[in-house]
Image (cartoon, rainbow, N blue to C red):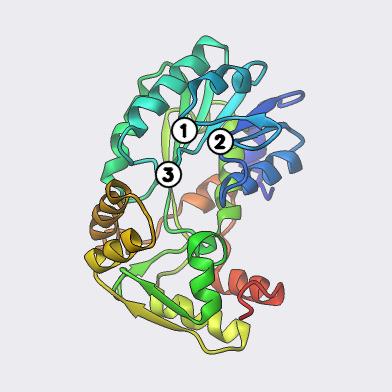
Amino acid sequence: MTTNKAYEANTMDTTGMTVLVTGATGRVGRRVVESAEAAGLTVRAASRGGAVRFDWADRSTWADALRGADAAHLAYLPDVGAPGAAEAVGAFARLSVELGVGRLTLLSARGEHQAHATEQAVRESGARWTVVRASWFAQNLSEGPLLEEMRGGQLVFPAGEVLEPFIDTRDIGDVVVAALTGGDRFAEQTLDLTGPRLLSFRQAVAEIAAAAGREMTYVPVSAREYGAALTEFGVPPEEAEFLVELFETNLDGRNAVLSAGVREVLGREPRDFSDFAKECAQADVWSA
């Protein structure tokens, strides 16, 4: 992890520190694991099907995952603002404190008012917390449900021409580890993270197409049209309705502003989207 002298001066002794990472196989969780291991921490990578079993919907898995850890990173699935998230995350945070895991980071979403109740539940848990609010992930276009569309050469998505400060999830991973190991420097703070420049989804797809050396297009649709398509593909109606609400609010331009969060925490600029696109193209991520 890249650091500066100010960061090093405020970093606590992490010798023997064990960190529980929930959602460890996800787009952010994998990078938290990588960054924590690079920092010399002992990582407990938790997921529904991993060696350390953890499931937000199965509370019987929580205590065993937590016992013996010094800190934990919380990533709620399916979304930090989804119905039931605040209750589950709050209960987990309180259990963490009871079991001696008093240092927590919560992955949250920038501009997502639906997530505020979940953030507040962590703040009220008694833990030493840090909320990490991140903008749209660049890796949403290289991993997960949008990847097949990208490989097919056409992204249909309800983002209009709104500008987003896409962030590389490797930067989020580095910030999370900095928060967990930074002593009091980042405790009781909400960190606002973005990439270094604003791009529309159309521009992002164009940059990927140029890097991959193939034709790719972006087709904007309304959130309602997108939700109807999700339902046709088998997404439960209540989940599709939540996503429609999320897209109608979160992709309305409210996030079209840059923050200095990554630089303030890590002492360096965030990774640029073009670097992400070139690296993924070299790895044939978007091959047809």
Q: Quadrant of residue 83?
A: top left
Image side of residue 126 versus residue 160, left or right:
right
Task: Give, as a three-letter code, the residue at label 3.
Answer: Pro
Residue 118: horizontal and vertical position, in percent?
A: 34, 32
Total residue callouts = 3
Q: Nearer the viewer, mark 3 or mark 1?
A: 3
Q: At 52% across and 52% down in the image, what residue appears?
A: 262
Marks 3/1: CA–CA distance: 20 Å
Q: Position of residue 278 (x, y in %)?
A: 64, 76
- The secondary element bearing badge 2 is classed as helix
Identify the residue at image location x=26%, y=44%: 113
Q: Amino acid at mark 2?
A: Ala
Measured Cα–Cα span from mark 2 to mark 1:
7 Å
Q: Which residue is mark 3?
A: 78
Residue 76's spot in the image, x, y percent?
45, 38
Residue behind mark 2: 179
